[in-house]
Amino acid sequence: KSLMALAITEPNAGSDIRSIESCAVQSGGNFILNGSKIFVTNGGLASLFLIAAKFKSENGNTGIGVFITEKDMEGVEIGDSEHKMGIRGSSTTSLYFKDVIIPKENILGTLNEGLKIISGTLDAGRIGIASQALGIAQAAFERAVEYSKSRKQFNRTISSFEGISFKLAEMATMLEAARLLTYKTAFLKDINNNFTKEAAMCKYFTSKIARKITNKALQIHGGYGYMKDLPLERYYRDAKVCEIYEGTNEIMKLIISQQILRGNM
């Protein structure tokens, strides 16, 4: 078994995929890859990388392709793991390519399918990010319920105060809505229906409510929630990245609006 990592983002190309500068130039039956990538999830653990790069073929064609690259290929360098605010258990690194020889057999799909492959991969990945956000939010919610039923102030459990119980009601409602939207998107993918709009919706909404729920859960715990002795501060930190990677939430709203205006209601 091999772990594979998708490498798209570059120092000067984040949301704007067409601005990537990594380039693979054809030379006979191979492509010579040069460039760099940043924020590569599993970069320090993967043995294979899917590299999005601009290409220049011998017949003059240009575009964006996806190249399967092995970590042991000469010219591939893996950077140190980044020190992140959250998801610290996930290895995030930079990648560097200097005159890496990529056989043309390592092109994923065809050269001109690069953007299509990237878009489809990101659509599927957004269901995963929504599921991640949902899990973080669920854990924070369960902790908040448990704590509110045991913590006493003014001779009463704090769950008996509407200021707390109403927060729990809001959290439970947001969780259920996010869960159903995520399940619906996964169902559409399973039956091979178009799910681009729904993928953006579930990633946007679930990551947004995860940040809100972890914030409310931490608030219910008060000062204890701010301490590293409890996992609330970790949930709070881990939730934030779900609004950023696999496409920022601003890009998600752009995708949703474009789909609607194209008639995908």
Image (spheres, helix red, strand yellow):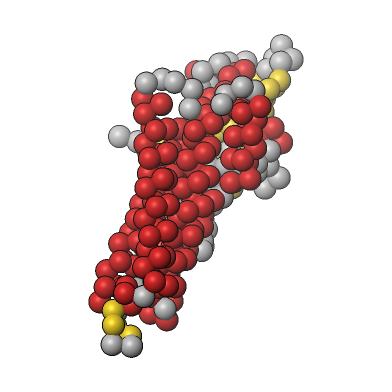
Is 39 rendered above or below residue 108?
below
Most distant residue in the top direction: 59
Q: Quadrant of the C terminus?
A: top right
Q: Confirm whether residue 86 shows in the render.
A: no
Residue sticking out furthest to the right: 60
Question: Relative to residue 200, is residue 155 depicted above or below?
Answer: below
Residue at point 42%, 52% (across, down): 174
Relative image position of residue 91 (x, y in whole percent): 44, 53
Numbered-mark total: 0
Residue 66 located left or right of residue 142: right
Q: Which of 57 and 232 is in front in this view?
A: 232
Residue 183: x and y, percent? 36, 36
Q: Residue pushed farthest bottom?
A: 154
Which residue does the image show at 38% across and 40% down from the upper left?
A: 180
Residue at image position (52%, 29%) is: 196
The answer to which of 136 and 147 lies nearer the viewer is 147
Q: In this view, does 201 lie above or below 209?
A: above
The quadrant in which residue 100 appears is top right
Q: Quarter of the image containing the N terminus? A: top left
In this view, the residue in front, 214 or 237, is 214
Residue 196 in view, yes or no = yes
Residue 66 vs 38, above or below: the answer is above
Measured as percent of width and height from the top left, residue 228 is found at: 39, 75
Residue shown at 71% from the left, 15% from the top: 61
Q: Left or right: 51 with respect to 21?
A: left
On the image, the x and y values in percent for residue 32 come to 62, 28
